[in-house]
Image (cartoon, rainbow, N blue to C red):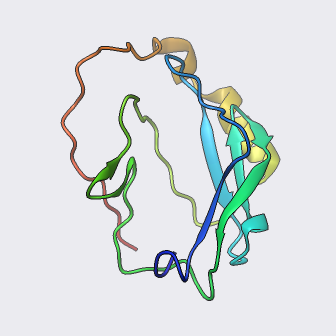
Amino acid sequence: MSKWPNDALKVSTKKPVLKPGQWQHVMVTYDGSSKPGGVKIYIDGVIEPVKTDTDGLQGSIRTATNLRVGQRSGNQVFDGGSLQDVRVYKRTLTVQEVQALHSTGPLRATLPPPRPNAPRPSRTPCTTTT
């Protein structure tokens, strides 16, 4: 996204895929094409059909805004869940690589599902620089 919503790209899954109370492996890849078809969403190693919500990207997705994980903006936060093992790659992963990451992660076997009323950790912004 360069400037929302006029110069941006947004896709989402066609159907609800997240299961409350269960750990799930979520992976999103993007091929740099500036097109909705370049975004793939995988849930537990399986590619999900997507719908295009916004298709107006005119250039690059590069922006001066820091990457936020679990928060879109100051008032739109991810709530009621947990994130673990967040990774950013310099290239688009293949289907086989996504499936391998999903199936080899030992966290799924060792971590209990999130408790619905568990105390929430403090919200500290996570930013990256390139």
Residue at x-position 39% and y-position 63%: 67
| Left or right: 50 as drawn, with respect to 16 | right
Nearer to us in this view, 46 or 100: 46
The quadrant in which residue 57 appears is bottom right
Residue at x-position 28% and y-position 15%: 118
Q: Position of residue 11 (x, y in %)?
A: 65, 58
| Left or right: 1 as drawn, with respect to 70 | right
User: Is residue 49 positioned above or below 118 on the image?
Assistant: below
Q: Position of residue 19 (x, y in %)?
A: 58, 23
Q: Position of residue 110 (x, y in %)?
A: 49, 13
| Left or right: 78 as drawn, with respect to 105 | left
Nearer to us in this view, 107 or 117: 117
User: Is residue 13 positioned above or below 73 on the image?
Assistant: above
Q: Position of residue 40 (x, y in %)?
A: 73, 54
Nearer to us in this view, 9 or 64: 9
User: Is residue 19 positioned above or below 72 on the image?
Assistant: above
